[in-house]
Image (cartoon, rainbow, N blue to C red):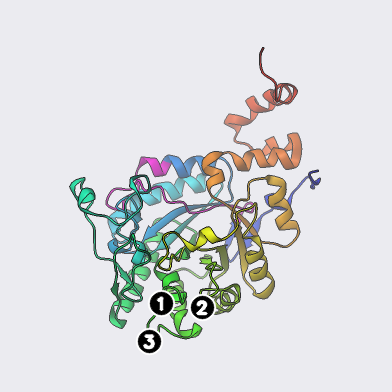
Amino acid sequence: MEKEHARDPLLFSPLRVRGVEVPNRIVVSPMCQYSARDGFAGDWHFVHYGKLAVAGAGIVMVEATAVEPRGRITHGCLGLWSDEQVEPLRRIADFIREQGSVPAIQLAHAGRKGSSQLPWNGNDRLGPADAARGSPPWTIVGPTAEAANPNRDIPVALCIDEIEGIYTAWSAATRRALQAGYDIVEIHGAHGYLVHSFASALGNQRLDAYGGSLENRMRHAVETAAAVRREWPDDKPLFFRVSAVDGDAAGWSLDDTVTLSCELARVGCDGIACSSGGIDAKRDRSVATALERRPGFQVPYAERVRKDTDLLSLAVGLIVDPHHAEDILQEGGADLICLGRELLHNPNWPLHARVALMGDAGYDAWPPQFRWSLRARAPWAARYKGTHPV
């Protein structure tokens, strides 16, 4: 039986983070659309993120946006390595803000998981057939010269000077995110991409200051966050997405996540989005598949971060029911609820959640273009729910 919740659920209460007022606790997780051209956002992105803002998410976060061309996952990934890429992203941020949501953007570097096919073309390394279609491969980089899995290319191991150059790219992309009008930046430190591959022992066999001990392996993550924070205004929040566990006892652990989170707080991070898996580690499929999928399966990671650090925690992973989302917040499992694929399935989830948790009063926050008509429809829809004409 579903629990009853207050007229003003915590899911729809505001949250102030630094100088940014988030109107509710629903976050659109960054989800790659693989629809950019040369890193530029287009109409698909405008409509996709625009409809999620219209639906009332508190934070609408634009997908992983590469800080340099070789940092893309695919040819279809967004980028902010050029000043010319700012304006299309500003158009999206402006519209998100006009709808009352907070525009956010995730900055990323794919590392050794770059130069990949579009998912619907196979998701493996780019090859001659892809080049013939106009999508040639490029040289990828990583902590060491070891492929993420047998279906990917061997990366070039980064030297110290090249690592410093990547920090410069992060800094420049952060400045462009500010120019584009975003209020929150998230660093992608999860899912086997560059930052995560440095942190996990499954992806990092270096013998210098960036490898070996936990302190050394997480150095790249902390220095990346420090580079971004130096460029990001003090009144704007900085989030960091982690794979809280690798799903392999030899890899990254939840205790490691807490240690890293404390270091990230020291350099100015405000929130940790707790995902998991993705490191690959020479397997035919991602380590993430070793984790049991069930509603809220990653919430314990967010709860641990919230309990053991001074940071906000963001929960993500099969949170599909509004009552479940509210319970997570009420029970202290997280400060913010991130929705991903559920919003692809139902972009209006935040609006439906208001009605589910607040009854007819939930319609008060719907856009006026929808509200007047759907409020009149509601009693008829309720009466005939589950029926169909004979």
Q: Residue 58 carries which label?
A: none
Chain part drawn in magenta: 22-46
Which residue shows up at 81% across the image and 43% down it?
Answer: 1
> Secondary structure beneath disc 1?
loop
Q: The C terminus is located in which quarter?
A: top right
| Residue located at (37% from left, 69% from top) | 170
Name the N-terminal-most of marks 2 and 3.
Answer: 3
Badge 3: residue crowd in 10 Å (few <14, some 14–19, many ≥20): few
Name the quadrant containing residue 156. Answer: bottom left
Residue 114 coordinates in the image, percent (x, y): 33, 61
Secondary structure beneath label 3: loop
Q: Residues within 10 Å of mark 2 (few under 14, many from 20)?
A: some
Residue 99 visible: no
Name the one closer to the observer, 40 or 297.
297
- Residue 105 appears in the figure: yes
Of residues 118 and 303, the one nearer the viewer is 118
Q: Identify which amino acid the numbered label 3 is placed on.
A: Leu
Pointer 1 residue: 204
Q: Which of 47 and 279 is in front in this view?
A: 279
Label 2, secondary structure: give it.
loop
Which residue has dot 2 on it? 267
Which of 264 and 249 lies nearest the eye of the viewer?
Answer: 249
**C-alpha span from label 2 to label 3:** 25 Å
Left or right of 226 in this view: 371? right
Residue identifier under label 3: 207
Question: Does the segment drawn in magenta span residue 137?
Answer: no
